[in-house]
Image: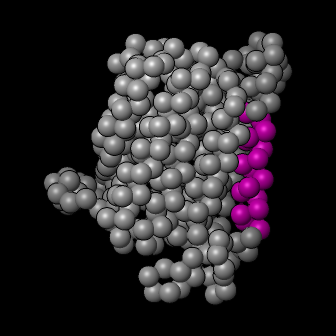
């Protein structure tokens, strides 16, 4: 684990994200943050993003590992900086909160500000994943007897393992590229929805996860956000279309299947390729349902 290289990479990524934020604020038609205000907002995001991001990552980890925190004492976990004791999506929540606070500091509409920031946030999410290359096993998946880059990379023992961090980083950049030129009143929510939905699959590939038995906490956290969006869509569809409850139903069905798939991966001899194929199909079903319901709401 090369913590120094990781911090340098994350520092460069933060600066690039801040610069991108400046240009996104400047060209946004809805977010009235330009000139000196855009510069100030970008610097605030740089500082508050690190502060709130780290705090969120640590807080979410402590909540997920609450029994261990009670057993060892919270001072045990706060006395050292261990990259394995941080929650990635807790960090995402912290950076999102930093963006909300920054919008208040520059007196901008929070929704428009977050929508303008969304693609810069996706860039930071992708770069943070790429940085996991310096954290040895943290961003890797299962050992593979035969593998080649970019599907596998060697760990510190020279063993080829699935390069999950690379898949996650590329996926985040694809999400950023897709949304970069789009103006949407729910852009931030939908970018985050895409990242979280993708993570339901990617988290299953990771060798190291914060887990309760076979339930992966980061995967659960991401799916809770996905379900919140699906419930929000269904509530808005009520009295407009039948069946208005379809997004909720799809979400719960896929959630149940995902739990069954994680159980199959951990406790049965079912071929992994078949299990992952079923998981991907479920994810596409959720994505299609959300997209269809949003298009209907926007056009009516």
Is residue 29 or residue 138 the one in the foreground? Answer: 29
Is residue 154 or residue 16 the one in the foreground? Answer: 16
Q: Which residues are magenta?
A: 274-290
Indicate whether residue 46 is drawn in magenta.
Answer: no
Query: Picture quarter containing residue 249?
Result: top right
Relative to 104, 129 lies left or right: right
**Residue at 76%, 18% in the rendered image:** 297
> Considering only vertical position in the picture, is 33 above or below 138?
above
> Considering only vertical position in the picture, is 244 above or below 178?
above
Is residue 20 or residue 293 the one in the foreground? Answer: 20
> Considering only vertical position in the picture, is 74 above or below 158?
above
Query: Picture quarter containing residue 151?
Result: bottom right
Residue 79, how many percent across, how many down?
17, 57
Colouring style: one colour
| Quarter occupied by the N terminus | bottom left
Residue 276, how many percent across, how many down?
71, 63
Is residue 110 shown to the viewer in this render? no
Residue 217, how many percent across, how many down?
47, 53
> What main secondary structure does the magenta stretch of the protein show?
helix
> Considering only vertical position in the picture, is 282 above or below 114?
below
Relative to 255, 35 lies left or right: left
Count of numbered circles on the image: 0
Residue 50, how many percent across, how many down?
34, 43
Relative to 118, 256 lies left or right: right
Q: Residue furthest front?
A: 35
């Amino acid at each position: 684990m090369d913590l120094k290289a990781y911090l340098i990479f994350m520092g460069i990524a933060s600066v690039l994200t801040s610069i991108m934020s400046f240009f996104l604020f400047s060209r946004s038609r809805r977010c009235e943050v330009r000139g000196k205000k855009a510069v100030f907002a970008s610097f605030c995001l740089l500082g508050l993003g690190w502060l709130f991001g780290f705090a969120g990552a640590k807080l979410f980890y402590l909540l997920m590992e609450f029994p261990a925190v009670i057993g060892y004492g919270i001072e045990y976990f706060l006395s050292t900086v261990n990259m394995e004791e941080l929650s990635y999506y807790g960090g995402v929540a912290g950076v999102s909160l930093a963006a909300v606070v920054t919008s208040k500091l520059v007196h901008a509409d929070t929704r428009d500000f977050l929508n303008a920031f969304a693609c810069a946030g996706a860039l930071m999410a992708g770069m943070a994943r790429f940085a996991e290359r310096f954290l040895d096993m943290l961003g890797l998946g299962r050992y593979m007897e035969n593998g080649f880059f970019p599907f596998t990379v060697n760990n510190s023992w020279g063993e080829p393992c699935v390069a999950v961090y690379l898949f996650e980083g590329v996926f985040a950049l694809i999400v950023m590229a897709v949304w970069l030129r789009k103006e949407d009143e729910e852009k931030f929510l939908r970018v985050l929805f895409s990242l979280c939905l993708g993570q339901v699959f990617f988290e299953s590939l990771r060798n190291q996860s914060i887990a309760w038995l076979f339930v992966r906490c980061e995967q659960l956290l991401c799916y809770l956000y996905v379900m919140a969006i699906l419930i929000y869509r269904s509530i808005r569809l009520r009295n407009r279309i039948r069946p208005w409850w379809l997004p909720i139903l799809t979400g719960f069905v896929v959630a149940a299947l995902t739990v069954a798939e994680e159980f199959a991966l951990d406790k049965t001899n079912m071929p992994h390729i078949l299990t992952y194929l079923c998981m991907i199909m479920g994810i596409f079903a959720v994505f299609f349902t959300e997209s269809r319901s949003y298009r209907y709401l926007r056009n009516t």
